[in-house]
Image: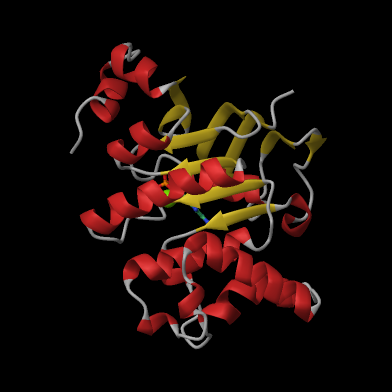
Amino acid sequence: MSFLKLEKIVKRFGDATVIDHVDITAERGEFVVFVGPSGCGKSTLLRMVAGLEEVSEGDIYLDGANVTDTEPASRQVSMVFQSYALFPHMSVHDNISFGLRMAKTPREEIDRRVAEAARILQIENLLQRKPRQLSGGQRQRVAIGRAIVRNPKLFLFDEPLSNLDAELRSQMRVEIARLHRDLGVTMVYVTHDQVEAMTLADRIVVLRAGKVEQIGSPADLYERPDNIFVAGFIGSPK
Ligand code: ADP
Ligand code: MG
């Protein structure tokens, strides 16, 4: 079975069906990118995988177990949002270690894991700063550091670079590709940036109004889009 499997997932908010029988898989170590217009359900899908949102129908399997109704903390899934999700009053060290401190992880282990994440992200010299003393790219590294220290088996990224300027975005895109290579961990990544999708993805899932429109490698979608909608999303960088 695939490392991550979403099986016939339906999500309703009241009368509105926002995810409509979606089947998606990710293999161990794979980098899967979700693209699609605003409101098509990308964030809702990630939130269900993370356990932050209940599914209305269907099942989610992760690493051989059905996790559909399990607690978020037990899933070993880390989610990275846009960088403004940092705690402004806490130092970089305390932002990164927040989840570990909540889980009553021993002090020495916290320090070891924070040091390791800081090394990977090259922010060792920033650990005592507050978020307001960081650049946008540094803040985003801290947000990723917070995910890394939890040692997840699955990373979820929800448009993590969308509030960075173009230059930083391309720099962080390279960093994320390196992180994926170095950690070898499965990643599911939401973006509306074609360049990010084409360069990062092993496979791209094109979503439209709560349904899967097409799934394929970047080359598949670029060369053989099933329809004009997919072609419009993948074909022409904005
Ligand atoms: P995307 O991330 O692709 O922009 P979302 O997953 O945020 O889309 O939203 C998908 C749809 O679900 C949208 O129509 C949105 O308005 C709706 N939605 C998301 N969260 C809620 C909620 N908590 N209550 C009601 N509707 C929601
Ligand atoms: Mg979203």
Residue drawn at x 77%, y 78% is 108
From the top left corner, tell me how far across and down residue 53 is, in percent: 63, 52
Q: Quadrant of the C terminus?
A: top left
User: How many callouts does the rendering have?
Assistant: 0
From the top left corner, tell me how far across and down residue 81 is, in percent: 47, 59
Rendered position, 65 above or below 158: above
- The residue lying toward the viewer, choosing from 1 and 150, is 150
| Whether residue 81 is visible | yes
From the top left corner, tell me how far across and down residue 201 is, in percent: 44, 32
From the top left corner, tell me how far across and down residue 74 is, in percent: 79, 54
Residue drawn at x 46%, y 85% is 129
Rendered position, 119 above or below 47: below
Rendered position, 31 above or below 177: above
- The residue lying toward the viewer, choosing from 197 and 117, is 117
Rendered position, 137 above or below 60: below
Q: Which of the 4 image quarters holds residue 21?
A: top right
- The residue lying toward the viewer, choosing from 105 and 81, is 105
Residue drawn at x 77%, y 55% is 71
Q: Quadrant of the N terminus?
A: top right
